[in-house]
Image: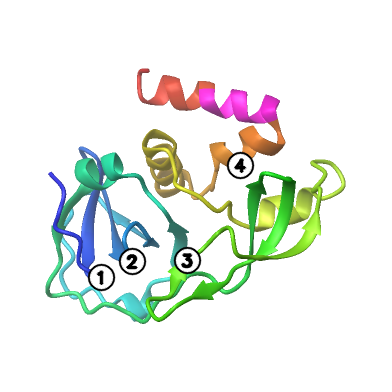
Amino acid sequence: MGVQWKENAVVNVKLTENLYTVAQLYQSTHVQFFKISNTTGKWDKLNLMNVPKYIFSFPDKHFCQEHFQEILKHVQPIEIAPPQYAVMSSLIKGKCLVETVLKGKHKIYDSYNVKIIRKGLDSVQDENIIRQYEMIGMENSLYLKFRLVYFYETGIDIDISKLSEFYPEEGRKWAGIFNKRFNL
């Protein structure tokens, strides 16, 4: 499937045979998902101003091609920008809590030109920080699908990539659940 990428376009996202959500495209691979889902993929009278934002993500090309069904031309996009709050990234120098930076006239989201707020995050001492903020980086297609499906089915947000980075045992547990859920 897939759609032609168009900044600010709102797309219908098919996650499973009976589970759909919507997302708004931002720049190149930046996508804002929303806390809304249904079983039909029909979005009559949808007003994104009334829908809470879920995650601002960087899905890989495979995810976009497989799950983005169509541009919803009748749905008005909202004003979005990369999160202005601090986000996490595993940088070459170790695990750091960083602040995002927007660069240039095209507002390129640059995970390497960031202000480090705290170096060397510890999985025990910094658990609240780790669980509060998003990771920076391209999301694995299968992990993102699991994260979205699990959230829309249960209301629980599980980020396997983050868990695997900071809590390997918990990450393996959820990866096992993920593998069973999708018959891998």
Between the C-alphas of marks 2 and 3, the distance is 9 Å
Disc on res. 7 = 1
Q: Earlier in the sequence, mark 3 or mark 4?
A: 3
Disc on res. 162 = 4
Measuring from the top left, give residue 8's x and y in whole percent.
26, 73
Kind of residue indicated by mark 1: Glu
Measuring from the top left, give residue 181's x and y in whole percent.
40, 25
Q: Earlier in the sequence, mark 2 or mark 1?
A: 1
**From the viewer's perspective, is the residue at label 3 or at label 4 nearer?**
3
Pointer 2 with pointer 1, Cβ within 8 A = yes
**From the viewer's perspective, is the residue at label 1 or at label 3 nearer?**
3
- Residue corresponding to mark 3: 109
Identify the residue at horizontal 60%, vertical 24% (top origin). Answer: 173
Pointer 1 with pointer 3, Cβ within 8 A = no
Residue segment shown in magenta: 168-175
**Eyeballing the image, is 71 above or below 151?**
below
Pointer 3 with pointer 4, Cβ within 8 A = no
